[in-house]
Image (cartoon, rainbow, N blue to C red):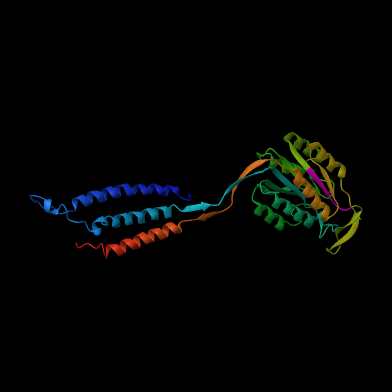
Amino acid sequence: MHFAHPHFLWTLLILVPLTVWYVLRLRNSHATMSLSTTTPFAHLPRTWKQYLRHVLFALRMATLACLIVVMARPQERDSWRTTSTEGTDIVIALDVSSSMMARDFDPDRFEAAKAVAANFISGRESDNIGIVVFAGESLTGVPMTVDRAQLLQYLQNLSMNVLEDGTAIGDGIATSLNRLKEGKAKSKSIILLTDGSNNTGVVAPVTASEVAKELGVKIYTIGIGTNGTAPYPTRTLSGRIEFQPQPVVIDEATLRTIADSTGGKYFRATGNRVLEEVFAEIDALEKTQMDVRHFSHTEDNYMLWAWIAFACFAIEAVLRYTVLRTIP
């Protein structure tokens, strides 16, 4: 048995002075009478009331003791179990440039990437995960956290056009490294999703990958886009957005160099299913060992003690005003 508030049990010590007080009071409460001899009274039979005269006090002490136990909140815990799992630091760097609206994925690259990333996050219960978004610049969407609800809520609410358009892959990696360098996990990695080539930004992608290598951070790069052409969004003179077929251009050489130099791996995702398989493979690669202790269930168990306290109080009240009633 466990107690939610075990410090309340110390108040059980109050029963000791109360018992001492009762004994002393009992000794001093009897009337006295002097007799020349007590021989005539020596063999008088004792009644059952004489044997029960201390029951009222005992019942009151039992009531008090049970109430103290109730305040300590006894609990039953079904079981404890220790599982071996791996805790790693992971940053998901997501391209949010306008080209991610291309509809060679269902419904488009951006929404497909968000959905697969959300499934990945949901399955990494012991990891410290952050989200970085980049386009013409980079931004920390969610700092490193184990709060899955916060990560999933951010992905759900994330929309396009939150940053200046462009593809600054190097800046996205640099921002991700700034988040990871504060972590304490032995294994650190970046999952970079992009559908283009670096065309802006302050930090060159290769330079950022060299820094990642020095920090021991692996980078998994994912090139998103079908082979050939894809319907890309274009803005007409009237301001409307239309989708026109355009060649898919992904700087695979740079993405492969980034991954190989840091001990990661490059993937090419040409559709929704392939993208899911890519994340499944990364999920299998990024596993390390740590012990996590879980308990299955905790249930309050104070009602039994409350009923015992009530029963003792009720029995005392009945006896005090019936068979053990005293005349002042």
Residue 66 percent location from the top left of the image: 39, 55
Residue furthest to the left in view is 36
Q: Residue at x 75, y 37 (%)?
A: 212
Give the magenta range. Answer: 220-226
Q: Nearer the viewer, residue 161 or 208?
A: 208
Position in image of residue 272 (x %, y %): 82, 55
Is residue 135 among what the camera can see? no
Q: Residue 210 location in percent, x, y?
A: 78, 36
* Residue in the foreground of this view, choosing between 302 and 44: 44
Does the magenta-highlighted stretch encompass residue 307?
Answer: no
249 sits left or right of 56 in the view: right
> Residue 55: which quarter of the image?
bottom left
Tell me which residue sits at (71%, 44%) in the image. 90
Q: Main structural element of the magenta stretch: helix, strand or loop?
A: strand
Q: Which residue is painted at 87% across and 42% down in the image?
A: 253
206 relative to 110, above or below: above
> Residue 5's spot in the image, x, y percent?
45, 50
Q: Left or right: 40 with respect to 184?
A: left
In the depicted structure, whether residue 189 falls above or below residue 166 = above
User: Dividing the picture into quarters, in which one does residue 255 lie?
Assistant: top right
* One can see residue 314 in this view: yes
For the point 60% across and 46% down, the residue is: 81
Front residue of 228/291: it is 291
Work out whether 318 lies above or below 281: below
